[in-house]
């Protein structure tokens, strides 16, 4: 009688292990003119023709939560005049003043809220730039809003460096330039927190979903 085959029981990996190889991809090439234009808008929906109507703007209830955690927003690095009517950041970068080339240390102890462009090539650049500026000490706190694309390298990069993550228990109804809800969002979202107020972030953002703390030796 043949010996029984041993079946190894699957053990889920810790988040830090999952993200071990997912470090920053350093892109030193300047974005093309088309990419630079698209980078000027918040949460851009992928499109072959850049249009203002493609901008996906963060609803005010999430901006209010970000402000509650960080006590304000000094910089929105991927924005526009229309988007900043809601975010009300003291400074923002746009098409004419790129976040990819300007330093993010706009004030002492800068607080950043970032809702980057969502097309695959642009969001990678945006996340890499965010992490680069974070590691250089350009800002003191930051909150990043992205899709919960846990299988992507840029998501794992954020998870590797952040202090906490809020996975929304719903799909965010983003706004367009006319302050109308966009109905065709097909994914849930995640908020990443960077800074020393992890407990405050957890308490504030639990109303939007559930908060987890990655095992990455981040700040308490």
Image (cartoon, rainbow, N blue to C red):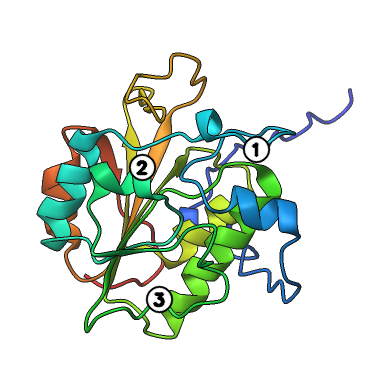
For marks 2 and 1, the one nearer the N-term is 1
On the image, numbered disc 2 is attached to which residue?
A: 82
Q: Spatial distance from mark 3 to mark 2, Cα to Cα? A: 20 Å
Pick whichever, 217 or 148, lies toward us.
148
Pick whichever, 162 or 144, lies toward us.
144
Task: Say whether residue 65 is left or right of residue 190.
Answer: left
Q: Spatial distance from mark 2 to mark 1, Cα to Cα? A: 16 Å
Examine the rendering and report whether any part of residue 16 can be seen.
no
Answer whether labels 3 and 1 touch (C-beta < 8 Å).
Answer: no
On the image, numbered disc 1 is attached to which residue?
A: 50
Q: Position of residue 109 (x, y in %)?
A: 22, 80
For marks 3 and 2, the one nearer the N-term is 2
On the image, numbered disc 3 is attached to which residue?
A: 104
Q: Position of residue 103 (x, y in %)?
A: 45, 80
Answer whether labels 3 and 2 touch (C-beta < 8 Å).
Answer: no
Q: Spatial distance from mark 3 to mark 1, Cα to Cα? A: 25 Å
């Amino acid at each position: 009688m043949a010996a029984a085959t041993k079946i190894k029981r699957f053990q889920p990996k810790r988040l830090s292990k999952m993200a071990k190889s997912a470090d920053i991809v350093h892109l030193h090439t300047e974005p093309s003119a088309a990419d630079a234009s698209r980078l000027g808008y918040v949460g851009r929906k992928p499109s072959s023709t850049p249009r203002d109507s493609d901008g996906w703007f963060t609803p005010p209830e999430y901006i209010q939560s970000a402000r509650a955690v960080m006590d304000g927003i000094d910089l929105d690095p991927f924005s526009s005049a229309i988007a900043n009517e809601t975010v009300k950041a003291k400074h923002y970068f746009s098409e004419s003043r790129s976040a990819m080339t300007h330093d993010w240390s706009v004030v002492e102890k800068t607080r950043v809220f970032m809702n980057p462009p969502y097309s695959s090539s642009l969001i990678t650049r945006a996340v890499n730039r965010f992490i680069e500026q974070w590691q250089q000490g350009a800002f003191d706190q930051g909150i990043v809003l992205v899709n919960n694309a846990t299988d992507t390298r840029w998501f794992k990069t954020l998870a590797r460096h952040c202090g906490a993550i809020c996975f929304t228990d719903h799909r965010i109804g983003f706004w367009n330039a006319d302050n109308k809800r966009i109905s065709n969002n097909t994914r849930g979202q995640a908020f990443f927190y960077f800074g020393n107020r992890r407990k405050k972030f957890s308490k504030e953002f639990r109303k939007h979903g559930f908060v987890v703390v990655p095992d990455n030796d981040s700040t308490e």
